[in-house]
């Protein structure tokens, strides 16, 4: 593993984000939501779970409870069957009901749209607040999840050991015009191209700008070759 040099070369960073922009000018979250309340709930449910799994659960949930009042009326036990297919559902159910109550009692039913107010809601930490504020265009923020953390290191945009420090490093190097969209580009790149186990360096649109590409050279194709060479399992196994 080569050490990542920080800060990165500004010209390389500029070319990197200009290229992401050309590929996906208006990247969006893959979570489904209709307003700030459903966004906060969807993001809170998404911890350690895929967006696809959350969307499957919220499609049914939001059809019956898409406001704090309705969520509170559903209650924890009523909410659990809708989200039982996603990770940490008991804790998430508790938080969603508690945050609905707080939004109603302290904020007249409207989700507070500032960092302090959001982070005071049960189950809403810095990362969730950043996703919400960024998604609604209120504050450009780069929430650092597992994909953003990994991709930032591989692309040589950060070298810190914690998500909060990586977030600070990214804010220091990503040029202002791209700050609001950087979170989406890095997440999508990590989800579909620069995957954790076998990054697809051979198909990566920013490979020529990536200091890590040689570390992973051939991993995806050798994995494909191994899969092709594997004998078929015996019938009935
Ligand atoms: S070249 Fe490989 S390691 Fe670098 S960003 Fe692309 S997929 Fe990730």
Image (cartoon, rainbow, N blue to C red):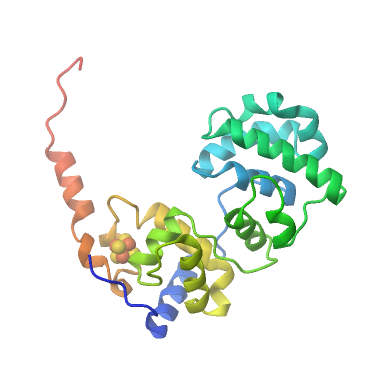
Judge whether 182 appears above or below 173 on screen: above
Quarter of the image with the C terminus in it: top left
Image spot of residue 141 (x, y percent): 59, 66
Q: Is residue 168 visible?
A: yes
Which residue in the rendered view is the most extreme toward the right? 108
Q: Nearer the viewer, residue 122 or 69?
A: 122
Q: Is residue 183 left or right of residue 7?
A: right
Q: Nearer the viewer, residue 55 or 174?
A: 174
Q: Nearer the viewer, residue 191 or 111?
A: 111
Image spot of residue 110 (x, y percent): 82, 50
Q: Residue at x 30, y 60 (%)?
A: 203
Q: Residue at x 58, y 39 (%)?
A: 55
Which residue in the rendered view is the most extreme toward the top? 236
Quadrant assignment for ligand 1? bottom left
Q: Quadrant of residue 94?
A: top right
Judge whether 4 appears above or below 184 on screen: below
Q: Quadrant of residue 83?
A: top right
Q: Is residue 26 left or right of residue 61?
A: left
Quarter of the image with the N terminus in it: bottom left
Image spot of residue 127 (x, y percent): 57, 56
Q: Is residue 204 visible?
A: no
Q: Residue at x 44, y 80 (%)?
A: 14
User: How many numbered discs, if any?
Assistant: 0
Q: Quadrant of residue 119?
A: bottom right
Judge whether 65 appears above or below 107 on screen: above
Q: Nearer the viewer, residue 108 or 122?
A: 122
Q: Residue at x 19, y 47 (%)?
A: 223
Judge whether 209 appears above or below 233 on screen: below
């Amino acid at each position: 593993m080569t050490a990542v040099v920080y800060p990165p070369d500004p010209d390389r960073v500029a070319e990197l984000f200009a290229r992401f922009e050309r590929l996906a000018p208006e990247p969006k979250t893959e979570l489904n939501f209709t307003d700030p309340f459903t966004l906060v709930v969807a993001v809170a449910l998404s911890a350690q779970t895929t967006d696809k799994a959350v969307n499957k659960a919220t499609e049914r949930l939001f059809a019956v409870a898409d406001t704090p009042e309705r969520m509170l009326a559903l209650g924890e036990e009523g909410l659990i069957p809708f989200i039982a297919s996603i990770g940490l559902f008991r804790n998430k159910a508790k938080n969603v009901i508690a945050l609905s109550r707080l939004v109603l009692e302290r904020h007249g039913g409207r989700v507070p749209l500032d960092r302090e107010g959001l982070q005071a809601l049960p189950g809403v930490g810095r990362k969730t607040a950043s996703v919400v504020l960024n998604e609604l265009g209120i504050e450009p923020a780069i929430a650092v999840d597992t994909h953003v953390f990994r991709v930032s290191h591989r692309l040589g945009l950060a070298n810190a050991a914690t998500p909060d420090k990586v977030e600070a490093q990214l804010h220091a190097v990503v040029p202002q015009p791209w700050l609001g969209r950087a979170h989406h580009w890095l997440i999508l790149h990590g989800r579909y191209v620069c995957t954790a186990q076998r990054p697809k360096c051979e198909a990566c649109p920013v490979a020529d700008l990536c200091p890590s590409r040689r570390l992973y050279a051939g991993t995806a194709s050798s994995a494909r070759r191994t899969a092709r060479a594997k004998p078929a399992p015996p019938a009935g196994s």
